[in-house]
Amino acid sequence: MTKKYINILIIFVFIFFEACVPSKPTVEEKELPADRLIKKLEANRRKIKTFEGSGVMNVESPQLSAKANFEVILIKPDTIKLSVFGPFGIDLAHALVTKNDFKFYDVIRNDLYTGDVKMEILRNIFKVDLSFDDLLDAFSGSVNLTSNLRREPDNFVINDDSYTLNYLDNRSKKKSIYEISIDEFAITNYKLVKDTTDVIFEGNYSDFRSFENVPVPFFSRVEYKEKDQSVTIEYRNIVVNKEITDVSFEYPNDVNVIKW
């Protein structure tokens, strides 16, 4: 092979690999205006219709300190199924919660609790003071931005590798602060703050992987600091937008049914 053809081959290979390498975001792509940024993030959150995950969950509160393996199924906007396992895969509990009613099966005691969904019911099952919608977002590692879709932020900063947006609620005097990774195009930190520095709630999200072009965190930690409560979730496996037809769980005929 002559030197001329070798040079042509080298140039061809170089061009081929250059074409295969994803280009980094341009300055224009990075510097999105706040309204487009929030709309794209919220659109990504809404693309996740169903969510299945398994991993390790750690709950810390004044009433409980526990770490366990778990599996969760979410069907937005109205269904959460949670199964908790002990050592060697032993079933400990199963919960099926919708916006209207719930079933909670304590496997060890063979007790099946049923009833209407109320805040105290969610607190007793999940051991944290989060609403149903907050629980959906906590398990899927997302942050609901609906309330900010038609608002301009009170402060918007573009850093080298992130955006920072602040929204102030004048009535409650509380401020929402979002830290958004430019490379991941995902919220990595969310704080709800009152009186400038007093953090009420904080969420941290990392180890993102893409599902249908939506970044989903494999690690999430949400802290309800006013109540000294936190939930840390580390996923091993995640599946999104798979059709789910059955979320029931089995229990024996001699189960003790308790209306809660």
Image: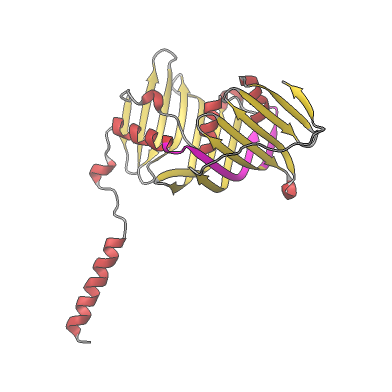
Quadrant location of the C terminus? top right
Q: Against 168, is 68 above or below?
A: below
Q: Residue furthest bottom?
A: 1
Q: Residue furthest right?
A: 254
In the foreground, 11 or 99: 99
Q: Position of residue 223 (x, y in %)?
A: 56, 31
Q: Residue 234 occupies which quadrant of the picture?
A: top right
Q: Residue furthest left?
A: 4
Q: Position of residue 237 (x, y in %)?
A: 56, 49
Q: Is residue 252 left or right of residue 193?
A: right
Q: Against 13, is 145 above or below?
A: above
Q: Is residue 4 left or right of residue 48?
A: left
The magenta segment is: 47-68
- The residue at 43%/48% (across/down) is 210
Q: Position of residue 81 (x, y in %)?
A: 61, 35
Q: Position of residue 152 (x, y in %)?
A: 30, 24
- The residue at 43%/16% (across/down) is 173
In the foreground, 25 or 98: 98
